[in-house]
Image (cartoon, coloured by chain):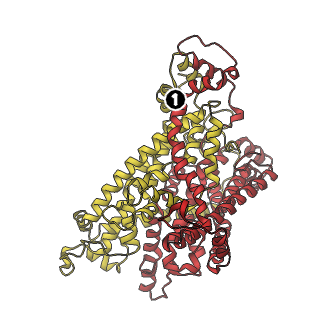
Chain colours: A red, B yellow
Amino acid sequence: MAVMAEGPAVPEEARPKSEAPSRERRSQKGTEPIPADRRRLNFRARLRRDRSLIIMITPVVLLLLVFNYLPMFGTVSAFEYYDPIYGFFHSNFIGFKNFTDLFGDANFWHAFQNTLVLSLVQLVLYFPIPIFLAILLNTVISTKLRSFIQAVVYLPHFFSWVLVITIFNQMLGGAGLLNQFLRRHHMATWNIMSNGGMFKYLITFQAVWKEAGWGIIVFLAALAAIDPALYESAAVDGASRWRRTWHITLPGMRGMIVLMLVLRLGNALNVGFEQMLLQRQAVGPQHAEVLDTFAYYYGIGNGNFGYGAAAGLFKGVISLILIYAANKAAHRLGEDGLYRK
Amino acid sequence: MSTLSSTSNPASAPGRRRTKPGSGAPRKRAKGRPVWEEPPTLIGRFGKSTVLTVVVLAVVVPLYAIILTSVSSEGAITRAGGTLVLVPDGLSLGAYRQIFSNGVVSRAVVVSVVLTAVGTAVSMVLSILAAYALSRARSVGHRFFLGMMIFTMFFGGGLIPGFLVVTSLHGYDQYWALILPSCISVFNILIMRGFYQATAQEMIDAARIDGAGDWRILWSIVLPTTKAVTAVMTLFYAVGYWGSWFNTLLYMPFDNSKWPLSYVLYEYVNLGAKMPGMDTGGATVQHQIAPPFAISMAVVVLTLLPILIVYPFLQKHFTKGMLTGAIKG
């Protein structure tokens, strides 16, 4: 997600108008460009003109149809007693039974509650860290040192969750470095990796370790866009370092902070599926079961596909509402959010 | 909802180092503290360096310890209490000899390399083509395709229907199931499209006048001027395939001769299952077999190593210019 702001995402509205003529020139390859009102071209002529573009996009469209859109229609299995032998079309249609079962299932509500709690903890504890680190890093004067630190903190972003959990196990787990140190000094051991009560903080810490460094990229970009003259004139006017941070740096990052917050809220139900799945065994489902793992274990683990699909559909719909609500909130704040009004 | 909003100006693209808005001249940071800025307090200076040191060490120390342990002798690991070794104390490459003479890990390395290479190639080719097609505004169906792609970012059928679709296409235990269902990242395509749109229109127009078609323009103009984003996206996709674990869990969890390395790491290091071939004839002759813990760490290092090797090499692309004077020159 963090990369979003990196690209020079030029909004379509702002594209130079020079593109329109270029379109027409295409149709008369090799001849003098003749300006013509492209709207006069009928659909077939445009199709002919753009045939290579259509060919270019076809594979991706086909893949999305098969692996993204087909599953959307596959959610019909949430209303079926799905049997792999009969498939989507011939399984028993049971209406909303999967959903009524789901809403009567204490485990499901527990997973839902876990999802919300974990998401909230991550929001409060994780979200400010990249902002803080970016401001801190921006004050490092030596360019070399700054790019070295950046290179190091970006690195864990490229590790898979399997790798991250393995590393955490070796550092903080029961047989890990920390506990070996405690044992050697005759102190009580503390196995954080399988401590259910600590789990929400543990996964937040893991998320910080893996992604916080990468998360600073967008904030550094926002900081780089602040006019340094502002700082200078503020300093000349006697504003202290803190006042400059408060009145220049933070307002300068406001748009980016709101955007990241919107993304986070829209993703509130995605709390790290692989991360949970990998540690569910160690801390127990009562702490690590979230909506995604619920759908996985009940759907694929138990072979109750319709039930799992119902849980997944529930999550998808709530997520859609959350994205919509978060963007509405961003628009209220006068920011763009994920999409424009 | 038609387009992702532009969240930054082109100056913040990864390739452009911090530039002063407007002037385009690089901000002179290297020269030191500006005259108007007061020197930091002792506490501030100390606090800042402490935080940054801790942050760097939090990443470096675990990697260092794991790499060191994987090349440590049994004695060193025993003296360290059976956990990670922090101080070099007797080195041995036994763990690597052991895992490479063992079928599971060496096969997994081959599988992972091929999977990553093929997957990344497929993903990149398809993404580049789609991003280019979408970057040509006002082409036929442009809005429709864009909307169709963006919609998948907001809503999906969910895990189970996806799984059911792949299995009903007989994807179970097939390598294509590890690649095709997740080979397209709409997000990456949109980023690439942003860069392609920023390619100088003058060059494209000039090429069109010279008779170049879209394929030619993509190959000879757009791609050479957007090498940085190509490199970064290749890195993203490759890292994704290299670490891909969940798809294996979904589609081929039982056949260990087909597993990629990250799944081997999960099964034998995370879950602690016994690696086949590791106990044949060696369990009693302890000095001949590498310590199991070093073997585990060697598997971890194998999954780490390609990232550590490729990362600094590709990182320079973050700092390279997007359009290195193609117009002015």
Q: Is residue A194 left or right of residue A322?
A: left
Q: Residue at x 48, y 88 (%)?
A: A187
Residue situated in front as seen by the camera: A280 or A224 = A280
The percent coordinates of residue A233 (x first, y second) are 77, 43
Q: Position of residue B21 (x, y in %)?
A: 68, 37
In-front residue for pair B93/A243: B93
Looking at the picture, how far across and down is residue A301, in whole percent? 49, 72
Residue A139 shows in the view: no
| Res A292 → quadrant | bottom right
Which residue occupies the foreground of this view, A289 or A91?
A: A91
Residue that sits furthest to the top in the current view: A32
- The chain identifier of the residue carrying mark 1 reads A
Choose top left, top right, bottom left or bottom right for residue B270.
bottom left
Task: Please give the residue where the numbered disc 1 appears in the rendered image.
Answer: A52
Q: Residue at x 46, y 29 (%)?
A: B219
Type of the residue with mark 1: Ser
Residue A223: image location, x then y, percent:
66, 48
> From the viewer's perspective, is residue B188 above or below residue B264?
above
Nearer the observer, A196 or A42: A42
